Image (tube, rainbow, N blue to C red):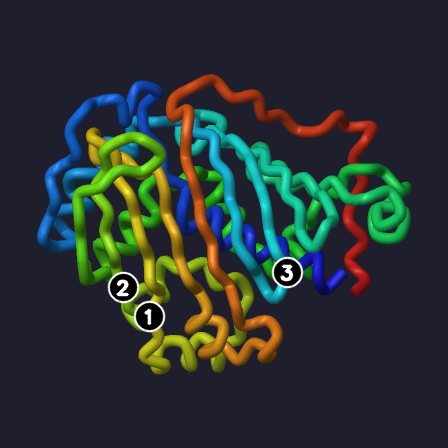
Amino acid sequence: MHKIALLAGALALVAGTTACGSTADSGQAGEAPTLFGNAQELVLASSGKTSQAQTAKFTITGSVAGETLDANGEGRFTGPSPAMSMTMTVAGQSQEMRVVDRVLYLKLPPEQAAQVVEGGKPWAKVPEDSEVGKAIGASMDQAAQGDPTQILEQIQQAGTITRSEQTTLDGQPVSHYWVNLDVAKATGTLNTGELPPEVLDKLKNSGAVIPVEIWLDSDQLPVQVTQDLTQVMQAAGAPAGSQNATMTMKYRDWGAPVDVAAPPADQVGELKTAS
């Protein structure tokens, strides 16, 4: 159960900090976008574009708490009914997550569901006051609400561009930025779940930074984001074997239709709250 909470919380952190969108036709122009000299100019140019998109498909690769991660999903990040669906493989085990109408659902392997889901149903509905619900906290709420400019807000509030270039990515012209996020300035927008106050104080006073790289297409819309949360994990006092946390997120098919719905009611049971 602890590992479910840890991995779900880490995934929620990623979802909350990288939920960016664009339009279905973005990235097709032949010229690289203009480079900006500071974070505020970058955010001003890109945030209006990202807020226009309501849907996106994405992939995530990386390592969280010593476990390798591969995930793919799609979501409606804005509009009247935000929702997200993601299938992930962690340490060779496949799981599925959905967020619909502000409710989180986890599809667990049968043997695990038999132990931790009421009635042994394949889908677990996660109560807000459960271990997993607390670990996820505001992170999944942000994912469900679909704040499509979250990473841009963090860059605006706490980011410093350290380097930039015009280049190509997956065959399309892009602008590539290296940004350092000051954790002390960003703690108001970082998805820290239910971390104790003393841990939050450690983060605020640690001097830690989150190295972020962001690639924008010719319409100034995100097509790839990488981040390294290792310094944050270290500052928070994570065990030595769980400090590495690096992610690469790729975005595609912006604005294309997506199909995300809650699981059938007869396949859903409450997640048992006992640890």
The residue at which mark 2 appears reads as 180
Q: Residue at image x 56%, y 76%?
A: 238
In the rendered view, would you say 71 is above or below 67? above
Q: Type of residue at label 1?
A: Val
Asked whether, in this view, residue 224 is left or right of residue 140, the answer is left
Dot 2 alpha-carbon crowd within 10 angstroms: few under 14, some 14 to 19, many 20 or more: many
The image quarter containing residue 232 is bottom left
Dot placed on the residue nearer the N-terminal end, 2 or 3? 3
Asked whether, in this view, residue 26 is left or right of residue 270, the answer is left
Q: Residue at image x 77%, y 28%?
A: 265
Asked whether, in this view, residue 25 is left or right of residue 246, the answer is left
Q: Type of residue at label 2?
A: Asn
In the rendered view, would you say 196 is above or below 227? below
Check the picture and name the quadrant holding the N terminus.
bottom right
Which structural element holds mark 1?
strand
The residue at which mark 1 appears reads as 209
Check the picture and name the quadrant holding the C terminus.
bottom right
All told, the count of numbered labels is 3
In the rendered view, would you say 22 is above or below 166? above
The residue at which mark 3 appears reads as 67
